[in-house]
Image (tube, helix red, strand yellow):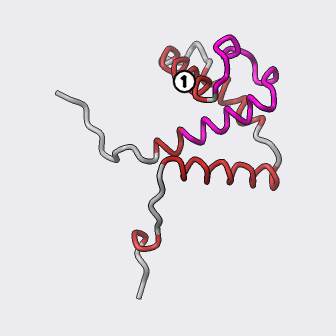
Amino acid sequence: MAYKAESITVQMSAGQRASALNHISALRTMMYGDCAIELNRFLTDMRNKRDEKFEQNSRALSAIFFLANISKERHNVEYSELTSDEITALIGAMNHLRAVVSLFPKKLTLPN
């Protein structure tokens, strides 16, 4: 008898998912080191003025910084200027967003 994926999954709240993602991030740090290159690339991509969605990307990035409780004056600093506490908070905010996005309805439709 085969197991179905639905029977072996556990329902988790957004907070539980975020905590689990933060725990996984800590384990990855121990195994592979930090994610400075990927995080720097992400910030660079989000700040790319040639992207047609630059305005929305900037707003999304500001929302991540806001969720991380990083002051507005520091939203435009380069990755290398962020403190380790700010990086930790930024990754925590990104993990929280990942957890919330995973709960979005699967088949969104636009209103008429």
Provide the residue span drawn in magenta: 69-96
Residue at left offset 58%, top offset 13%: 49
Kindly give the residue lying farthest to the left in the view shown. Answer: 112
Residue at left offset 75%, top offset 55%: 27
Question: In the picture, which quadrant includes the C terminus?
Answer: top left
Q: Is residue 102 above or below residue 83?
A: below
Q: Quadrant of residue 89?
A: top right
Q: Position of residue 91 (x, y in %)?
A: 67, 37
Q: Position of residue 74 (x, y in %)?
A: 70, 15
Kindly give the residue lying farthest to the bottom in the view shown. Answer: 1
Q: Is residue 40 above or below residue 24?
A: above
Q: Quadrant of residue 79?
A: top right
Q: Position of residue 62 (x, y in %)?
A: 57, 20
Residue at left offset 40%, top offset 69%: 6
Q: Is residue 103 above or below residue 56?
A: below
Q: Identify the residue under disc 1.
A: 63
Residue at left offset 34%, top offset 45%: 105
Q: Magenta: predominant secondary structure element?
A: helix
